[in-house]
Amino acid sequence: MTPADLSMTVLRAVRRAVDENALRAPVPARVRVERTRPGGRGDYASAVALQLAGPAALSARDVAEILRERVAGTPGIGRVEITGPGFLNFTLDASADAFATLMARVREQGPRYGHGDALAGDLLRCSHASEVRAAVTADVVGGLVRSQGARAHIGCDGVPDPDWARLGITVEAEEPFPAKIRPVPAGATAGELLRRLGPDATRWGLLRPAGHDRAPLGNDLLVQGEANALFLVRYAHARVHALTRGAALLGFTSEPGEEPGGDEAGALLTLLADHPAALLAAARHRAPDRLARHLEAVARAFLDFHDAASPLPVGDEKPSAAHRSRLALAEAAGTVLAGGLSLLGISAPEHL
């Protein structure tokens, strides 16, 4: 169960409690769940009961108990606890069924895994300066909000640079809108950056730092080494495809049976489950850097997992159910990396 799934599950519980007249309060548009803080219980927590207590004229713990009864037993949720004044704490089911469900969802949705309708009905009308970093950022923000069901109309306050087209940017309208996208300027033109870095490194260099930070655009963006986050993300994606090719040569394919054990597999699974929430946060905050950092974390977690438990047989090993499950997890990571890079407008090569 992903954080987005969990949020919808709790929201449905609220709606059901209201429909059954067990809770007299307005149903919120959305329910926020977040990672449990250090010292807390479970995997995720929500303060929705505290939010509803006043309108419902009940204590937050009473509201939490009403919701707990309607969430407990949901597939994918192992345990629901109430802590403090009325926080709901959720421990997700780490069984093979939950693992298989997540793998199936990623496989079914492909690079669109994490896309949703949380922002359906919203319309983003914003404009950017006639400057390359602002143009690239606005272009990606438009794609992010559309991935969550919103509509977007992006304008340019000035004269578009013809070189933007070489970065994959299409100017939708040459008109200003009230909302502005104004990251710290790059200090160079699109043509200058393209000549020195090429389109992929240019886009990553402009998008990876937060908008209020200066964008480092040195030649280290071209270095093929772990210190270069862009190389790391694209290498991890290419490595996944190499694993799939290697498995085919050995006569087997991925199959999500038992969840791969180990801390490294658990860390990677958590990041994959969090991907829809990461996309939604990047869209809501108009912050492509959040997605870039998430992809970097997925890449590092995948490489740690790969080194700790190879998805391919080693030495005299024969392909087993464990290898098939590990390969399924690796391929899910590759799918997330491909989809995220696509939203950033960066290519995801199968060979690197």
Image: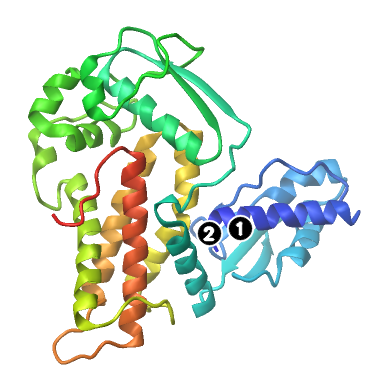
Q: Is residue 85 visible?
A: no
**Residue 56 at x, y = what percent?**
86, 46
Label 1, secondary structure: give it: helix
The residue sitting at 15% across, 57% down in the picture is 351
Instruction: State the CA–CA distance, disc 1 to disc 2.
Output: 6 Å
Q: Kindly check if marks 1 and 2 are in contact, taking CB atoms under 8 A apart as contact.
A: yes
326 to the left or right of 22: left
Residue 2: image tag = 2
Is residue 316 placed above or below 225 in the rendered structure?
Answer: below
User: Quarter holding the C terminus?
Assistant: bottom left
User: Residue 50, image x and y in percent?
Assistant: 73, 47
Q: Of helix, strand and loop, which one carries label 2? A: loop
Residue 307 drawn above or below residue 274: below
Q: Quick one: label 2, few (<14), some, or many (20+) residues within 10 Å?
A: many
Q: Which mark is residue 205?
A: none
Residue 94 percent location from the top left of the image: 51, 74
Q: Residues within 10 Å of mark 1 (few under 14, many from 20)?
A: many
Q: Which mark is residue 6?
A: 1
Question: At 49% across and 63% down in the image, what residue appears?
Answer: 105
- Label 2 is placed on what type of residue? Thr
